[in-house]
Image (cartoon, helix red, strand yellow):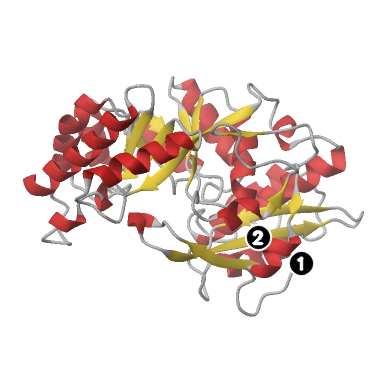
Amino acid sequence: MVLAGPDPHGIGGEARIWKLIIVRVDSDEGLYGLGEAPHIQLSPVGVREAIAAIRDRVVGRDIRDVKPIVSEILWGARPPHRPSIGLGAVPFGAIVWGLGGVEMALHDLLGKALGVPIWALLGGRYRDAAPIYLDWSAPRQLDDLGAWADMALDAVARGFRDIKFDIDFAATDQVTDVWSRNLPIAELERIVARLTAVREAVGWDVEISADCHMQYDAVSAIRLSKELARLRLKWIEDPTPMTHIEAMIRVREQSPIPICVGEFCTAEQFRELIERGACDIVHPDVLFAGGLAETRRIADMAEAHGMPTALHNNSGAVGVVASAHVAVATRNLIGVEYHFHDAPWIGKILDRGRPLFDDGRVVVTDTPGLGGVLDEDICARHLDAGEVLF
């Protein structure tokens, strides 16, 4: 089912309507599992349609075979096995994104069936809670340095000590050519001044990172990183397009700030990024990597190369709790993202009997599966047009 509702502080500080795809997988023993898939590409060739296609390969299968099911959907298997080719021919895009939600639901279902939490299915937990970094994007009043400072201080007051801002939305009042990937001096100076206001407001005990959304060329990204170095950022994220691997390598080699990439990448894509030295920090998302086990696979790959893992998160309560289960089971974890700080309904659709956040963290418990149930009242109030509750 699709949920929809207001997000008062979206990207660039603009209000928007946000949609969530919630997935449910039922077993013949009366149990069910919940997952979340990204609402991106809700169209005739989008995520919801991918989920419908995936259903035909999941119905009737043994829920204990989560990884073989995922592998078959991504890659197929050798004949005489049928099907011998992955559902989307190549493991990218909507098929993988739909699979992320289905695989999440299968893990929730399997955990309930076995009476264990998802983190136990992933090998056990290194910590009891996942630290959150709050994505604040940018204030609406870009030229008001006080607004930048106040926004950062508000995050700290809410218990978060790790904050991210969107570089490409930090100085849109200075953009003169929307097609150029080059960063002119006037825009660069405003970016530096505005993030400096953040650093001066919160001091040196709060982490700050910056997302570029793959908008810049290598020359601009390197220049930006050197100008921001004195602010001691945790990372610069996706400075160049993810398909420009040579540019990513050049930026990573010359940037004084760690480079974090990969929110839309699968394990095979991360393998190349890691082996070619295109990043310092891997940044998978359970919604886009193909699920929880694939995300753990990416994190293990990074750890074997001495690299930390941060979890990108573009989801509501179901997805962020699932990400927290992955996070506590990941040794090299340095944070999990959350966007929807000003849209309470998004964080309350999953009822776990406790607030979503505890001092800037998502606590995981011993409750089987994800550890929660849908809040049907909140879901009913936010059903998208034409949708019905499960």
Please rate how many residues cluster around mark 2, counting C-alpha atoms within 10 Å: few if below 14, some from 14 to 19, many from 20.
many
Labels in figure, total: 2
Q: Nearer the viewer, residue 320 or 302?
A: 320
Q: Nearer the viewer, residue 89 or 325?
A: 325
- Residue 237 seen: no
Left or right relative to 217: residue 52:
right
Q: Residue 276 appears at what percent x and percent y?
A: 33, 31
Identified at 90% across, 57% down, the residue is 28
Identify the secondary structure beneath mark 2.
strand
Q: Earlier in the sequence, mark 1 or mark 2?
A: 2
Q: Are marks 1 and 2 in contact (CB under 8 Å)?
A: yes
Quadrant holding the C terminus: bottom right
Identified at 20% across, 56% down, the residue is 172
Please rate how many residues cluster around mark 1, counting C-alpha atoms within 10 Å: few if below 14, some from 14 to 19, many from 20.
few
Q: Residue 126 appears at what percent x and percent y?
A: 63, 21
Q: For the residue marked with disc 1, what is the amino acid?
A: Phe
Identified at 17% across, 57% down, the residue is 173
Identify the secondary structure beneath mark 1.
loop
Residue 135, quarter of picture: top left
Q: For the residue marked with disc 2, what is the amino acid?
A: Ile
- Residue 279 seen: yes
Residue hosting label 2: 22
Q: Which mark is residue 390?
A: 1
Residue 206, quarter of picture: top left
Q: Is residue 84 above or below residue 237?
A: below
Q: Which mark is residue 214?
A: none
Q: CA distance from mark 1 to mark 2?
A: 9 Å
Q: Residue furthest right?
A: 29
Q: Residue 382 appears at what percent x and percent y?
A: 63, 68
Q: Nearer the viewer, residue 279 or 168?
A: 168
Q: Residue furthest left?
A: 185
